[in-house]
Amino acid sequence: MGKGETGLRTYDGGVAVITGAASGIGRALAGELAARGCEVVVADLDVEGANEVAAAICADGGKATAQSLDVTDPGAVAAVLQAVWERCGRLDYMFNNAGIAINGKFEDFELSHWRKVIEVNLMGVVYGAKAAEKLMAGQGFGHIVNTASFAGLFPWPTTIPYTATKHAIVGMSAAMRAELAGSGIRVSVLCPGTIMTPMIEEGASPQRWAGSYPQEKLDAFFRSARGMKVDAFARKALDRIAKNDAVIVLPSGYRLLWDINRMSPSLAIALSRQIYQVIMKRVS
């Protein structure tokens, strides 16, 4: 990298790696980043889907490549980022976005469920953040963006392993932001509420649930979901990332519940109890 090429690019001319980018929020972020002039690496375990996303971006005149990546393999994560840095000479953005969700009652989650969710949702972010920080520290700039969830800011029921990992990502991101403040490396955390992605639209899959629930009720429950369109989320999220916001909550209406949890945790738990009862009544 030449001496005149240092400094974070927002977003034109930058380079971004996005995990879990074959669908949902990752796919939307990839498309919007490319539209804003960023070269994107579409990384996903679903390499066929990643290739489709990268091809669509290139067909629209953007710059993108696809990369098969299992975020639970720290060596693979580090190797992908190193290869991108060697090819491009820089790494402006690392979006640790890959994640999974499993629904059900706490009593129905097996340890295997917990291990799977923790390894993908939390350790996948740890591996990506660690590898990105090493490269960004050497170049003197960069922005690490970790995807948590509104479930990381509120005691969201019926998906407790997911809620636990998302709380961990929020705390991790805040502490990283504090530690790295003087290094030129920015850290932000995305906390989406209900966003219309395959995680919502395909949530009625029996494999997504711990325990046994009537399929017709699961179908009806997820068909009734209403949320922010994923492309609108990507546009608003990137605007906030460009401003270096620390915690990005979208849609903005979810901030009220976040405020309630901060001001009165007991009230938030009472609301969570009501949410739990409503959900279980609808799916049982």
Image (spheres, helix red, strand yellow):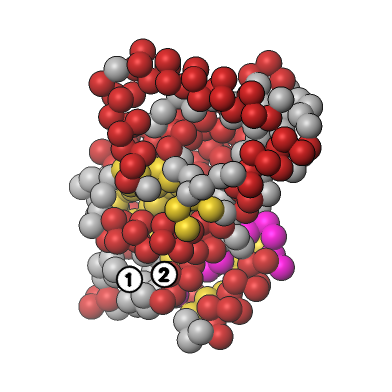
Q: 30 left or right of 161?
A: left
Q: What element carries label 1?
A: loop
Give above or below for 118 relative to 144: above
Q: 49 left or right of 191?
A: right
Q: Does the magenta stretch include residue 40?
A: yes
Q: What element carries label 2?
A: helix
The one nearer the camera, 200 or 159, is: 200
Q: 158 left or right of 271?
A: right
Query: Which image quarter: residue 160?
Result: top right
Q: Identify the residue at horizontal 48%, vertical 80% (top origin).
A: 63
Q: Identify the residue at horizontal 48%, vertical 58% (top origin).
A: 230
Disc 1: which residue: 11
The one nearer the camera, 218 or 175, is: 218
Question: Number of marks in the image?
Answer: 2
Q: Give the range drawn in magenta.
A: 39-48
Q: Earlier in the sequence, mark 1 or mark 2?
A: 1
Residue 33, label in figure: 2
